[in-house]
Image (cartoon, rainbow, N blue to C red):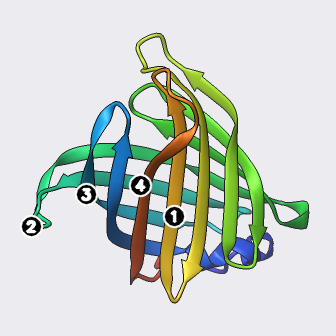
Amino acid sequence: MDVHPDLEPIAFLLGRWEGAGVIGYPTIESANFGQEILFGHNGKPFLTYASRSWLLDADGNKVRPLSRETGFWRIQPERQLEVCLAHPTGIVEIYVGEVVFHKIELQTDVVARTATAKEYSAGRRLYGLVNGSLMYAYDMAAVGQPLQSHASAELKKAAEFTGEP
């Protein structure tokens, strides 16, 4: 299936990405994590997105699941980007930002939480394609803490896009 022409600025994301990174925050102990991200499309002008991560032990073995998120990446005129994400923890985020070559900068425009979700008020994400790896950094403001570093990872393309996920 052909990629919608509007998606050209973010088509480099298409496929399955796998790798590892580091998480930390003042309210949690720093740790290593593994992650898989899937970017797909169905011919319309948006990408589908699904991410899952898990805690890794010192030897790189999976210990337990961490986070999941799913959503849609929508390109807008002049390389602007809107990203809608939902989390099973009761949080929904809308990010806005822009694409410059193979670098994407996003910040939350809207955060909504259910009554039982943890306190979370803002996020900022930076993605970049560097020497074939998808690098990213995620900052968050949550549980009474100001916006600060929470996670970063390096992901390698594990599979090319083969169809809508």
Q: Secondary structure at mark 1?
A: strand
Q: Residues within 10 Å of mark 4 (few under 14, many from 20)?
A: some
Q: Nearer the viewer, mark 4 or mark 2?
A: 2
Residue at the top extreme of this rendering: 115
Q: Are marks 3 and 1 in contact (CB under 8 Å)?
A: no
Quadrant containing the C terminus is: bottom left
**Mark 3 or mark 4: which comes first in sequence?**
3
Q: Are marks 3 and 4 in contact (CB under 8 Å)?
A: no
Q: CA distance from mark 2 to mark 3?
A: 10 Å
Q: Earlier in the sequence, mark 4 or mark 1?
A: 4
The CA distance from mark 3 to mark 4 is 16 Å
Above or below for 96 versus 10: above
| Residue depth check, mark 3 versus mark 4: number of the one nearer the observer | 3
From the viewer's perspective, tell me whether residue 65 is left or right of residue 114.
left
Which residue is denoted by mark 4 in the rendering? 51
Label 1: which residue? Answer: 136
The residue that appears at 40% across and 73% down in the rendered structure is 155
Q: Which residue is mark 3?
A: 32
User: In this image, 38 relative to 141: left or right?
Assistant: left
29 and 132: which one is in front?
A: 29
Q: Earlier in the sequence, mark 1 or mark 2?
A: 2
Where is residue 70 drawn, in percent x and y?
48, 47
In the structure shown, which secondary structural element does the residue marked by tag 2 occupy? loop
Residue farthest front in this picture: 26
- Report, in whole angstroms, how far the alpha carbon at label 1 lies from the one at label 2: 23 Å
Task: Give the amino acid at mark 2.
Answer: Asp
**How far is disc 4 from disc 1 in space, using C-alphas?**
13 Å
Dot 2 corresponds to which residue?
A: 59
> Mark 4–mark 1 contact, CB under 8 Å?
no
